[in-house]
Image (cartoon, helix red, strand yellow):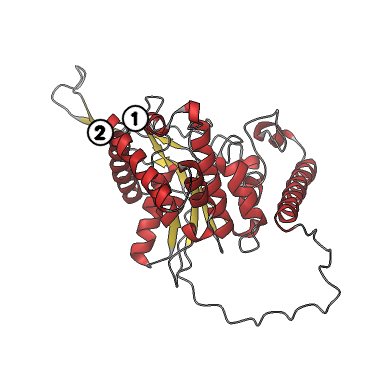
Amino acid sequence: MSPQPIPKYIERLALQIAGEEAERARVANTLEGAQEIADRLEAESEAAGFTSVKEYIKDLTTRPEGVAPAEGTHPTSAFWSHGTEHPQAPLNWNNEHFLENRYIAEAWARTQNNRVEGSAQTLETTAAGRRLNNMYLFQDQVREALGGETDGYSYAWARECWGNISQTYAEAADGPVVIFAETAHTRSILYRDELPTLHANQHVGLENINFAYSAPQAWSSEARAELGTNEVRAQVQVDDPSLPHYVDPAVHATLEPAARRAALDAECASVTAERTARTEHTKHAETGVTTGTAESDGPAPAAPEVQAAEPRPTARIPVWQVGFKPTPVKMETTSFSPGVESTAPPEPALAKQTSGTGLG
């Protein structure tokens, strides 16, 4: 049985959140709004003892305290990438009515928290995430007000800021996480920063990475069953054959079952090895100590006392088919049926994968 489309109550709430955010971004991208943000950031940077807005924002995006959940809560952390076309969604940079998965994730988190307080969160709802979001660094007028490209306030810099905080957020995750995407595009922050960090996070790991959307409907049944598992989608990529860890779903389905399994196992093992090496390199760079190297000749410290785990609020991790259930609309009366009204569903919105121009 195929997963159901994204529920109507999530769709309605996501559209509401997206509309509100689009209006705030529009105001931020005016000369007056952008200057107000720039003035605020200059004042905050100076008050915090930083010599530049850039230093201030880098500190904000790399501090784990900023993305930590409220005291006494252990929410399921949501991550997202790209989105889907929707006729009622705000227009994006490409003049498309496009609903980012961010808003679907936030709608899901809100409904979960209404059911069980403190059970779900997104990056943009953490303290640091809200602050960074309210800077509107992707808006041209804001970057110009801060100094523009000549001072290094570029689109690439804004994306780096979000990449930093995304990685910090993934490092702070604990327990099951949910990914609002069908697959992770190679140019997305999800693929480059978040999934490798979640994989290496000892409090998450591959076994706790869950995709909210089922594998693409266009894939064959074999590809959906084998490439569409949470574990595989958290490791391989299906969009760029020129980059490592590419698997072509169409070609995969033509192989013999044993060959498919062997190839997939080898690819996943290669990803794990790379991510392990990356983690060890990072640890060594931060501490100067290589794994397995003793720091002293003294006795090993006693293991900390293990306390009983606190009961955690439970968030229901969705498994949906990306896209929305079409709403029947009235059709105009035709000459073939005079005086008779009929209804027919509109064309369903097509899901997209990220083009590398969005946050996720």
Task: Note whether residue 134 is visible.
Answer: no
Residue that numbered label 1 is attached to: 91
Give neighbour class at mark 2: few <14, some 14-19, many 20+ (Cα, 10 Å): few
Q: Position of residue 319 (x, y in %)?
A: 49, 52
Which one is in front, 239 or 39? Answer: 39
Task: Note whether residue 359 is visible.
Answer: yes
Residue that numbered label 2 is attached to: 329
Q: Is residue 324 above or below residue 141?
A: below
Give neighbour class at mark 1: few <14, some 14-19, many 20+ (Cα, 10 Å): some
At 32% from the left and 42% from the top, the residue drawn is 21
Give the structural element (helix, strand or loop) at label 1.
loop
Q: Is residue 81 left or right of residue 259?
A: left
Q: Is residue 290 left or right of residue 150?
A: right
Q: Earlier in the sequence, mark 1 or mark 2?
A: 1
Name the residue at the top extreme. 335
Q: Is residue 315 above or below residue 60?
A: below
Q: Is residue 226 left or right of residue 81?
A: right
Q: Position of residue 64 (x, y in %)?
A: 53, 58
Three-letter amino acid code at disc 1? Leu
Give the structural element (helix, strand or loop) at label 2.
strand
Q: Position of residue 158 (x, y in %)?
A: 48, 37
Which one is in front, 358 or 108? Answer: 358
Which one is in front, 242 or 41? Answer: 41
Q: Which image quadrant for residue 190? A: top right
Please identify, in this view, whether the residue under mark 1 or under mark 2 is nearer the observer: 1
Mark 1 and mark 2: Cα distance apart in space? 22 Å
At 43% from the left and 65% from the top, the residue drawn is 119
Name the residue at the left extreme. 339
Three-letter amino acid code at disc 2? Val
